[in-house]
Structure formats: C-alpha cells, structure tokens
Amino acid sequence: MTGTADQRTAAAAPTDVDVAVVGAGLAGVGLGARLRRAGRTGFAVLERADDVGGTWRDNVYPGVACDIPSALYSYSFLPQPAWSRVFAPGAEIHRYVQDVARAEGLAPHLRLGTALTGARWHDDEAAWHLTTSRGPLTARALVTAVGRLSEPRVPDLPGLGGFPGRVFHSARWDRDLPAGLRVGVVGTGASAVQLVPELARRAASVVVLQRTPPWVLPRGDRAYAPGEPRPDRAALAEEADRLFAARLAGSPAEAELRERAEAHLRAQVPDPALRALLTPDYAVGCKRALFSDDWYPALQQPHVTLEASAPVSVDGSVLVAASGARYEVDVLVLATGFETTRPPFAHLVAGRDGQLLADHWADGMTSHASTVVHGFPNLFVLDGPNAGLGHHSALEVIEAQIDYVLGALDHLDRVGGPLEVSAAAEAAYTREIDRRAADTVWLRGGCRSWYVDERSGRLTLLWPGRAAEYRGRFARFDPAPFARAAGHAAGQPEARPF
C-alpha cells in the first residue's frame, strides 16, 4: 500500500468529502475499513508518510514487537489467524495493517504523502476546511486518528547538536547502522527494553542511561508451531480485562503483581547491588509495565554498562551523566518516548469561534466518551483523551470508538447537524474520569509517567476502568449529550444537553 500510484490517485481525488480521517495507523485504517463495509465511500484517509501502518511503520529498531499477546492485536472483524509468535514482531504487524488496507479496498481513499497543516470549522457551511501539504480539502466530519506514539520526544541536552557521531530517536532508526560501535542508549522504557538486548549482540559496547528503572515482568514469548491453534481472542480479552484489578492502588491484585515482578528480578539478577539499581520505588503499573526475558540478562553482559542516572549534557563524543560519569560513544540512541499528553496535532485544529484544540486542552485533554469535544462540532478523536488502556489492547477502545463514529454519521444522515457535545456532558465525563483515576496506581503509585498531564496532574491518556465497560457504554452513539439538535441550524430552539 505504498508508492506513486496511490499518490497519483490522491492528486486527482475530490476536494470535498463527507469524512476526512487523519492518520493511517491501526485506528485510521480500521475506521476506513468499517466505513467501506457500511457502504460509505465519500471519505479520505490522509497520511503524511508514504505507507500505512502508523507506529508499526515508523518503529523498525531491532527487537521491536508487540508487548501484548498477538491474538489481541488484530481487528475483531478481520482477525489474523496466523501470527508467527505469541508476541508478534513489528514488521509482521505492519504487514497486517497493509494487508487490511489492501483487502478492504482502501487504496482509492488513501492520500499518502499528505500532511495535515490546518483544520478550521466553518459554521456557515457546517463543514471542516482542511489545508494539507497537497492542497485544500472540505469535509462534513473530521476524524483524527494520529495515535499517541507518533511524535518523538527529544531531550533538551546541552551539546546534543554538536555530537559528531550518529544520533537518532528509536522511532527514527538508522537502518544502515553498522555493527561494532560504541552505543549510548538514553532511556529505559518499552523501546529500550526491546532494543538493548539486540544492540548488545552487535555493538562493541553499550551504555544505558537510566533515570528511573522500569518494572519488568516475564514475557514468555515463543514461536507458534506449524498448525498450532492460536488462542481464542474473546477468552484472551476477558483474561486481560481481569488485570485491571492490579491497577487499583493498594489492592491484593496490585501486591500480587509486584511479587511477580520482584520474583522475576530476583531470578534474573543475582547481584544484590545491581538488583537494587534495577528496583523501582513506585508501584507496578504506575509507569508502563514492561515484559521481557532478556532485558536483565543483557544488562549483565561484560560489554554492557548500566548508568543509574540521567544524562545531563553531551561534550563532543562524550555522554555526561548526572553522576559525573562520562562515556565516549559513537552512536547515541534516544529511547525517550513521545509527545503524549500535549499532542502536536491539537495546534492545527480550530473549532467554533476559531479556538484551537490545544487551547481547549490547556489544562489537560478532556472529552466526552473519550471521542468528542465541546466547541468542535463533527470532530471525533480516536485514541485520544482517556482512550488508552494500561492493561489491555488499544484496539479494544479503538473499535468501540469506530462504532461510535459510525453511529454518529448515521445520526447526521437521519437528523442533520452539526453534532456538538455539550459543555455539561464533557465536564461530567471529566469529573468521572478524575474520580475513578484517583484510586489507581497511575495517580497514587508514586511515579511520573506519560499517562499523566504534566501541568494539571490529571490522568489524561488512560481509561480508568475495564475495556468491557468502555465498550458497553460507548460502542453505540447516544445523541442525548449533544447540545445542538438537528433543527438548531434551521433556527429551532437548542436542545437541552441531557
């Protein structure tokens, strides 16, 4: 699903569509497939890259793989029955997204190499006017499906710009990186835990700079045998949802999960001094819990060094740590995460009266149903505020949101619009999120994480409940919380919010 043929199609495509979808990762491709299946052909999927796949297209570092069981990482309406491993490699997931786009006939709707540069709501037309790198576009509805792991976060390290060797973020991997180099890795999050063991196999030396250690649980990955049946997706989803109990601070399930993580650390790290450096001082799950059987062994190899402090500067080819230690390296890998709580796309979207979505979210992302935002008619945000899961597959929420969007479009067809959720509904949902988040490890676990808005201290990335509950409540569109009834544009009285 790449190449100039799709781009030529896009160049000749109409400039007025019913639905504009921004992003061709799992959320955008999934919505496109469901739109086609519903008989809706008046849509366009804008993608700034030259291929579909989102984070699985961008992340090609050695060792990249899913960190939840593969059986949960495909659409329920188009399951993948032949994953090669319990935890699928990233390239395999990328191929799956490409195959879905091809099988579902999305090529005529894809506008690859097309970056969104602005979007503004026009009340008089009840439409979104988009500007893109390939020209303007008008749409009745706008859906953002850009994901939360699409904009790399680069640390502001003095001297970084003068580093003479290769320096890149883990999501912008240098495919031509030769073996036998001295490599510095900044960060110990999910990407680092996957790539460091692979780097240790090919680098002359590796130094890992750790600000805070992660909790690591056993992974148990393996290849499936030929003809071996894959796990039942529904049963696996129910099992995963039970893990939410461990995200409640002070619960027996949380204590049990901590014991599992501590046992894994004890079993793999016999040296008590190193074990102490690798033991977090916060609750399991407060930061993203990681799964690996080779992270701890990699750190104990003679040519791998764990520096238990963060980098403070770069002095030529020397990486300087907060401890005062200095490490000369040829390559610097920034496994430093992504812009999550303050998504850059929000600076491009202007709603009613020209208000930027970024300004609406100045105190942290808010929404109703994790999908719609007051002041932004006919806008739907997939995988956005409180739409992530800290214990389950992201697709559980994404698919429910897709159902919600399809229901909203059907409502617009029947009744008219525009659809704008009321301020009261958004405020009530935000209060519910805050109340439910207060008892979770994400707010009470004693850590700083990318799940929590750094300004307000609110949990803005995750749904603080079970996936099944989210699906039960929001997989069906409910028009009641929307302030503008169909007749409003025609001069009829505004509907009450509830």
Image (tube, rainbow, N blue to C red):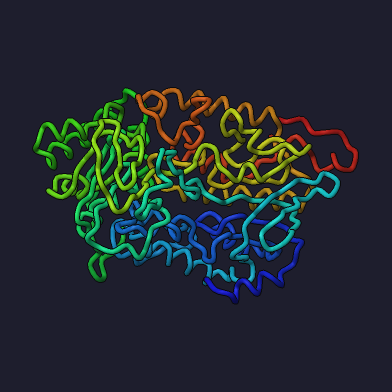
Residue ID at (46%, 57%):
76
Residue 359: percent from left, percent from top: 65, 33
Q: Nearer the viewer, residue 53 or 102?
A: 53
Q: Splitting the image into 4 quarters, where does residue 350 fall?
A: top right
Residue sticking out furthest to the bottom: 5
Q: Which residue is at the far right?
A: 491
Q: Report the residue at 66% width, 62% height from top.
A: 44
Q: Quadrant of residue 64?
A: bottom left
Is residue 480 in view?
no
Q: In the picture provided, is 370 more to the left or to the right than 309? A: right
Q: How many marks?
A: 0
* The C terminus - image quarter: top right
- x 25%, y 28%: residue: 255
x and y percentages locating residue 289 in the rendered image? 32, 39
In the image, 276: left or right of 142?
A: left
Please say whether residue 488 is visible from this viewpoint: yes
Q: Position of residue 284 (x, y in %)?
A: 30, 32
Residue 363 is situated, as x and y percent measured from the top left of the image, at 59, 28
Instruction: Give whichever of 447, 199 is nearer the camera.
Output: 199
